[in-house]
Amino acid sequence: MKLNELGLLVVISGPSGVGKGTIRKALFKIPDNNFVYSVSMTTRKPRENEVDGVDYFFVTRDEFEKRIKNNRFLEYAEFVGEYYGTPLDYIEKNLAQGKEVIIEIEVQGALIVREKMPEAVFIFIVPPSKQALLDRLMNRGTEQGADIQKRIEKAEREYNLAYKYDYIVVNDEVTNAADRIYAIIRAEHAKTERSIHMYYKLMEGNTNGKQKH
Ligand code: 5GP
């Protein structure tokens, strides 16, 4: 029997351009992991190389708003003029199966999850310096001028919310950051508050301190 059979919801968050997506991909390369990625839904247009159902579910505003009305999101947020949201069913199903569900979302959405699922693990990714984030946003070539500016301004506000998270991970080097997240997940599973109920159940099976076989 495992001490903790329910999966963890791991929220990877932080300013746009900090490298959340790259870290998440590195995390999934760690051997023998039990992670699943919750693909978000968005109204923004796909970038070159992005695949529907893999990077995002790309939908119209109408469709997104219909899903909001029907309570189909764990959380959603409007980020520089587009909707982004986490579909609820996928999360519930995988947590019940004991998988680690990783979601990668911006700060507003993460704070909503914090209210709804305080037992989730909240990780804030920060750049090694402000300049590093600026360079990345300017040079990654996925946004145009006005959009880059909006993302920079948003990042400035988001930096101040780091204290609301459980952990801060610096993205100095992608594999380092992924390793730290992996270590956090393992440690979280061992936390007394997560495992005490299963521990007692395990002990009920013991007689005179001897383990039943
Ligand atoms: P991008 O347009 O760069 O793919 O994403 C913009 C921001 O939205 C990023 O910070 C990304 O992490 C965040 N994001 C992606 N999916 C979701 C989601 O389902 N919910 C929320 N709140 N943010 C998301």
Image (tube, rainbow, N blue to C red):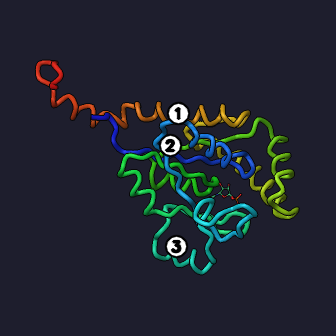
Dot 2 amino acid type: Val
Task: Decide if residue 120 is on the left or right side of residue 209.
Answer: right
Work out whether mark 1 precedes mark 3 in sequence or the reverse, and give the earlier one.
Answer: 3
Could you tell whether 189 is left or right of 49 in the image?
left
Do the residues under discs 3 and 2 have CB atoms within 8 angstroms?
no
The residue at the far bottom in this view is: 62
Q: Secondary structure at mark 1?
A: helix
The answer to whether the residues at label 2 and label 1 have Cβ atoms under 8 Å apart is yes
Q: Earlier in the sequence, mark 3 or mark 2?
A: 3
| Total numbered badges shown on the rendered structure | 3
Q: Which residue is mark 3?
A: 68
Question: Could you give the CA–CA distance between mark 2 and mark 1, rounded to whole angstroms?
Answer: 9 Å
Q: Of discs 1 and 3, which sits in the foreground?
A: 1
Q: CA distance from mark 1 to mark 3?
A: 32 Å
The CA distance from mark 3 to mark 2 is: 24 Å
Q: Which mark is residue 184?
A: 1
Picture layout, residue 44 above or below residue 174: below
Q: Amino acid at mark 1?
A: Ile
Viewer-proximal residue among 2 and 203: 2
Picture residue at 80% right of the left edge, 59% below the top: 142
* Picture disc at residue 20: none
At mark 3, the secondary structure is helix
Residue 2 picture location, percent across and down? 31, 35
